[in-house]
């Protein structure tokens, strides 16, 4: 799969607030599919939770491990690092450089 296609999957997965909420839940610790279904009980049925997890897995944001009948969903932070390196890091460096120049100018005045 091309890098552009993978980026599209990643940003599509992050576009939905319920998927971001699932990722937030997995940030602290891996969650079973059952635990995620319980968390969203009343708002999402099991089939919909599974569809959202499929989108997250296809985008590379989660890794799924099966232990018997239990499906564990683990957050994969790698794609977030890639986003940071490509989109945030260069701007953060420029902002830090600007702040350093401002400090230097103020101290020199």
Image (cartoon, rainbow, N blue to C red):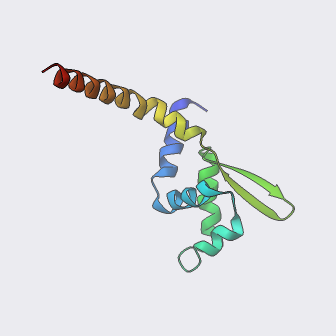
Residue 58 percent coordinates (x, y): 63, 47
Residue 74 in the image: state x and y as whole percent: 68, 52
The outermost residue toward the right is 68
Residue at image location 61% in from the left, 66% down from the top: 49
x then y, percent, for residue 10:
52, 44
How many numbered callouts?
0
Question: Which residue is pictured at 46% across the width and 60% down the height?
Answer: 17
Point out the image quarter for the N terminus. Answer: top right
User: Against 52, is 106 above or below?
Assistant: above
- Compared with residue 82, is residue 76 higher up or lower down, i.e. above or below? below
From this viewpoint, which residue is outermost toward the bottom?
42
Q: Nearer the viewer, residue 42 or 85?
A: 85
Residue 79 position (above or below residue 104): below
Q: Position of 53 compared to 20: left or right? A: right
At a point 53% along the width and 34% down the height, the residue shown is: 82
Q: Is residue 94 left or right of residue 59?
A: left
Quarter of the rendering occupied by the C terminus: top left
Q: Residue furthest top?
A: 108
Q: Is residue 39 left or right of residue 103?
A: right
Percent from the top left, x then y, of residue 64?
73, 52
């Amino acid at each position: 799969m091309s890098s552009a296609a993978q980026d599209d999957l990643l940003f599509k997965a992050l576009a939905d607030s319920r998927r971001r909420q699932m990722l937030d839940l997995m940030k602290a610790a891996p969650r079973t599919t059952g635990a995620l279904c319980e968390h969203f009980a009343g708002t999402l049925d099991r089939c919909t939770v599974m569809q959202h997890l499929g989108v997250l897995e296809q985008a590379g944001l989660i890794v799924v491990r099966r232990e018997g009948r239990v499906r564990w969903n683990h957050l994969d932070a790698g794609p977030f690092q890639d986003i940071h390196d490509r989109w945030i890091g260069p701007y953060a460096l420029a902002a830090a450089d600007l702040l350093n120049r401002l400090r230097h100018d103020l101290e020199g005045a």
